[in-house]
Amino acid sequence: MRTLPVLAAALLVFLAAPLNAQETAPPIEFETITLKNGLTIIVHEDNSTPIVAVTVWYDVGSAHEEEGRSGFAHLFEHMLSQETENLEQGELRRLVAGAGGTRNATTNNDRTAYYEILPSNRLNLALWLHAERLGRLQVTKENFEREREVVKEERRLRIENQPYSGGVETLDTLVADWPPYNHTVIGSMDDLNAAKTEDVRAFYEKYYVPNRDDGRRRRCDRRPGARDGGGVPWRHPAWLGSATATRIHSDPAQRRRTTNNGRGPSGERAGLHRRLQHSAHQR
């Protein structure tokens, strides 16, 4: 007969614990910078472990898709892991894994996010890879058609071959009574089949620009080939030298440095660059 009070007391302790933790949680300090091209950088420094996390959010999700073009935002989550002007097919994955890191990406109704977690002394690798994909992605017919088939197979596996999937899709679109949210993130098979390479390239040029790019723990130097908010190519910064325009090889013996002999940028963002480099090499 004494079990009920004991359980009630345990429940009170359990409910009180999150409130206690919330009251004592330390604030997260960060610095926010917005560049003239619209790129927003959020930097949080934590030296408790010798790793760095770089997350880039693009302000585009399934709610931004045009009618008849559902699934494009999620399709580009796959496309941005593919070939660029200076990265061959599969090199992105090999470079991150070879540096002892992990990477992934997610898409929802409102945004697409890409991240890497790496040893802190490989910060420049993550930054270069993001800049390369932002400015030099190869949106070719071959790359598009291959990744479209990957997405279609993902839809078959996770949606069409699952019990009650039709009900789940319906419930997913009932939460918000607003047209941009009345279709699922993965899109319909009909829309994916109807997509053309030109449609995908236009989507990339419209949404994958710095003023829709929120870089967290990202150095704000502009890289060659990337675009400003209006889709205009960036000027090659002098401090980067010519090495960044060369192909990055998976073979370490052939790999070129992506900075100009270790020199950092000058001008308005030099202070932030020094702080990031100090954090990366502090240990």
Image (cartoon, grey):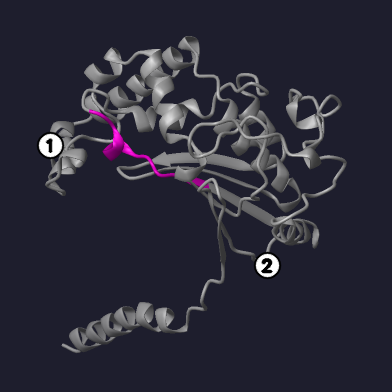
Q: Where is residue 203 in the image (x, y as percent from the top left)?
A: 39, 27
Q: Closer to the N terminus: mark 2 or mark 1?
A: 2
**Residue 246: percent from left, percent from top:** 76, 24
For the residue labelled by badge 1, is the local secondary structure a helix, a strand or a loop?
A: helix
Using the rendered view, name the quadrant where residue 279 is placed: bottom right
Depth check, front residue: 52 or 124: 124
Residue corresponding to mark 2: 48
Above-or-below relation of 36 to 161: below
Cα separation, mark 2 vs mark 1, equals: 45 Å
| Left or right: 38 in relation to 60 | right
Residue most extreme to the top: 142
Quadrant the C terminus occupies: bottom right
User: Is label 2 in a helix, a strand or a loop?
Assistant: loop
Give the residue number, with chain letter if any, for mark 1.
Answer: 167
Q: Which amino acid does label 2 sit on?
A: Ser
Q: Where's residue 176, x and y in %?
A: 16, 48
* 144 horizontally vs 52: left or right: left
In this picture, which residue range is highlighted in magenta?
Answer: 56-66
Residue at (41% x, 31% y) in the render: 206
